[in-house]
Image: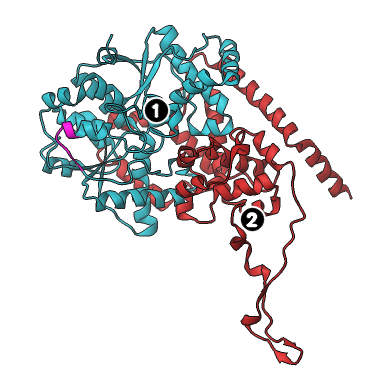
Amino acid sequence: MTTKDKYKKVAYYPGCALEGSGHSYNRSTKAVGKALGLELVEVKNWNCCGAMEVKNIDPKIQTYLSSRVMSTAANEMDMDVVMAPCNGCYHNLKKAEYDLANDQESAEVVDRLSKKAGHKTYESGQVETIHALDWIKESIGEQGLAERVKNSLSGIKVANYYGCMYTRPRHIFPEKDQGPGSESTSKPHFMDDLLAAAGAENVDFPLKTACCGGAHTLSDSDTSTKLVLNILKAAKLSGADVIATECPTCHSGLEMHQIRAEKTLGEKVDIKILYFTQLLGMALGLKAKKVGVHENINDSMKFLKEKGLG
Amino acid sequence: MPIHEKSLIRPENLTTHEELVLDGVDVSGHWSTFIETRVVKDYNEDMQDEIAALPGGEHIHRCWQCGSCTNACTVNALNPDFNPRYWIYLIRMGYESELLRDKDIIWQCVSCNKCTYACPRDVFPEGVMKATAHWLEKKGHTEKSPSTHFDEVFTEQIVSTGKIEESRTMRRFFSRTGQALAQPWMIEMVKRMLRGLPVGMLTRMGLATLIAPKTNDWSKASAAIQEYIDEQHDKQVQALSLAELVETAKQDVAA
């Protein structure tokens, strides 16, 4: 089976954030999938991937938590691809995959915990974990997307923001940096490619993989506000109207600290923040509400109407 | 050997005499400033091994001090005192008192992994930062950082239910660190969040705070994880000689 066909039906792992603050990402991902004729089967009775926080307490527990999700997809649902739109979930599943293949001790701990928890131990290689970007890029492609566009995003200037977890550290993403067609860890472009295919004008944005301080968004808010302010200002200076995001932690971090910068530092940066799936959905002819634009904290309804979308 | 002496010329190492006459010559004023000799006597030879025994710190011995980590560091760009290369150097040399000067900022690593990306020796500096921050807390050099409180609140919720409900995690974190939830920017954010939200969405959000989402049949997994956490805790107590530390403290109090 080609990659193109393989990605047409995937196990969907939304993760905790997409059921809370990142609900509009969940909604828009599903809506885009439906509009493109791709099938998502949600992982049964999933658990948290462990996120950054559990890794900080103990990395092997995070490996176990992520492995349980992959074990369910492989052993109980017979799926061979897991798609995670959240950078954190995607990153953790990839990290667990790497550790299980390369670190004997991690594999032993996971086996022990899985047996005690009463489910099959996940064996590395049983599933392939992909991001929502890989999913659309590989199964539909730029050409396919361009053919399906109903409302072009032309006239919208976009700064594509990928964050940290999608490309770093390099070793957990063996498929990246593999030459033409593969994703780059230093200059990622999958989101740029998809949005360009939908008609958007991507600006030259230098902070694509800068950090928003998401790990400490509440525990060290001043640092996060400064980091977010850098990103917002750089996007604005690059000429962007919109920052396109692909991670619920980055997205809510940008939205929260955009307000916090205004309230605590008196620095107001007027720029819209939208999930890339929201932009793609509207390009495919979906209404703004169908892709959850009204659920975002920053208000981009008026702007989108002016551009003939939503 | 890295050049770090500049940072050692601190105000407290400088002596300036306002009124000083030597052999009948008046040498008062700042041109007579001199740097006091500084001698390190408190090498902690166990520090590197102890930090290497904590998760993330395993590969600290690989460092050859190229400085790529600090050069790439997100937090260093905001605060030049945040210097992973320098801290790794101090830990490997056993300069405990020097490391302790920065004890209150080491936890501020944002885990962006730019250092790990840049490191040519696979030291995993991000992990070393976490291990060092934990070492400082476990050894009693610092209070638990807000980040550690957050990690604990988060992990407790996952161990008990398998999933995270964000507003609950947030409320517990604020109460544990003694902060008011109703900060002006937070109120503004909630206001903007509520604008234009349909009733269905509000109901769903309300329900989520009452009935926290959870993974079904989680009890066995929960018990297995908790058992592993306790086991690791015991190992760390041993690796960091924490029992001896408590014993010494007791004797000090008794004396």
- Kindly identify which residue carries mark 1: B207
Please give the range of residues in magenta. Answer: A196-202
The three-letter code of the residue at mark 1 reads Leu
Indicate the position of residue A52 as horizontal and vertical percent values. Answer: 49, 33
- Determine whether A236 is above or below A39 in the image: below
SS at circle 2: loop
Task: Name the kind of residue labelled 2 in the image.
Answer: Arg
**Placement of the N terminus of chain A among the 4 image quadrants:** top left
Left or right of A202: which side holds A126?
Answer: right
Percent coordinates x, y for residue B223 in the rendering: 61, 18
Quadrant of the image occupied by residue B204:
top left
Question: In the rendered image, which quarter contains the C terminus of chain A?
Answer: top left
Q: Chain under label 2?
A: B
- Judge whether residue A199 is colored magenta: yes
Q: Residues within 10 Å of mark 1 (few under 14, many from 20)?
A: few
Q: Quadrant of residue B24?
A: bottom right
Q: Is residue A119 above or below residue B21?
A: above
**Which residue is farthest bottom?**
B24
Which numbered mark, 2 or 1, is in the foreground of this view? 2
Q: Tell which residue pokes out farthest to the front in this image.
A: B1
Chain letter, colour red in render: B
Which quadrant of the structure image shows residue B41? bottom right
Please check the rendered image and state whether residue B185 is part of the magenta-colored stretch, yes or no. no
Residue B178 showing in the rendered view? no
* The label number, if any, that marks residue B101 in the structure image: 2
